[in-house]
Image: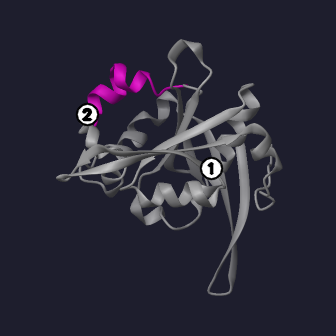
């Protein structure tokens, strides 16, 4: 099985511990545990930042495990779970903005449980994901689209060195007000030249 891994150290209370982050395809055996983590709580904090203006309903357990919704996740190379020390904590994803032309790729990430935020998991996992997407495609550009209300995603994009490429003003409507849609991106040569020495691959 092909994993994209990273190991890094955190220092807490003078103790050193190693954290291993892996990305892998979602398998049928993961379906129930993944649904419980991701979709069992309709009011989970992550839903407030992940495009809430679309007002999409979360999939039911039955539709995810046995229906067409879950089928789109299983063994999909563009949807992978994030494993923190072999425990599921989130998902990275990608989709082609231009459909079957497959020349414009957008990537995303969700860390579902709020208790796993502010631990650099998103930075490590999304860096691995962009590495993988560039390795598996010949594309010169990978993008990320978010909105002004998702400060965590904006911070992640900036921290990773993605360039702000567009800001479409006042096009997302949520909670009684309009918000800007914001696009980030990185070119292959920019990514390859970037200093990501803190990420060590264990392939």
Query: In the rendered image, which residue does mark 2 sit on?
Result: 60
Q: Residue at x 28, y 33 (%)?
A: 59
Q: Is residue 193 left or right of residue 67?
A: right
Q: Quadrant of residue 187?
A: top right
Looking at the image, can residue 122 be seen?
Answer: no
Q: Residue furthest front?
A: 169
Residue at image x 72%, y 41%? Answer: 131
> Would you identify the image quadrant in which residue 189 lies?
top right
- Magenta span: 58-75
Q: Is residue 173 placed above or below 138 in the rendered structure?
A: below
Query: Considering the numbered disc 2 on the image, is that residue within a helix, a strand or a loop?
Result: loop
Q: Position of residue 80 (x, y in %)?
A: 56, 36
Q: Nearer the viewer, residue 26 or 177?
A: 177
Question: Is 110 displayed left or right of 25 in the figure?
Answer: left
Up the image or down, 69 lies above or below 152; here it is above
Residue 65, x across and y down, in percent: 36, 28
Percent coordinates x, y for residue 165 in the rendering: 57, 44
Residue carrying label 1: 163
Determine the residue located farthest toward the bottom in the rendered image.
14
Could you say which is closer to the camera, residue 184 or residue 52?
184
């Amino acid at each position: 099985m092909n994993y994209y891994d990273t190991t890094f150290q955190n220092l807490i209370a003078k103790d050193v511990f190693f954290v291993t982050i892996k990305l892998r395809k979602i398998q049928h055996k993961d379906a129930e545990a993944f649904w419980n983590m991701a979709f069992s709580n309709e009011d989970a904090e992550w839903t407030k930042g992940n495009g809430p203006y679309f007002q999409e309903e979360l999939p039911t357990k039955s539709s995810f495990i046995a229906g067409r919704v879950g089928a789109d996740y299983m063994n999909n190379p563009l949807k992978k779970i994030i494993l923190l020390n072999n425990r599921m904590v989130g998902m990275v994803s990608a989709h082609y903005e231009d459909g079957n032309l497959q020349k414009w790729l957008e990537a995303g990430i969700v860390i579902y449980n709020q208790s796993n935020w502010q631990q650099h998991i998103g930075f490590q996992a999304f860096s691995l994901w962009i590495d993988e997407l560039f390795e598996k495609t010949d594309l010169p550009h990978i993008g990320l689209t978010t909105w002004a209300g998702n400060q965590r995603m904006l911070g992640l994009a900036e921290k990773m060195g993605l360039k702000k490429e567009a800001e479409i003003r006042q096009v997302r409507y949520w909670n009684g007000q309009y918000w800007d849609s914001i696009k980030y991106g990185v070119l292959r040569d920019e990514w390859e030249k970037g200093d990501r020495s803190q990420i060590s691959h264990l392939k």
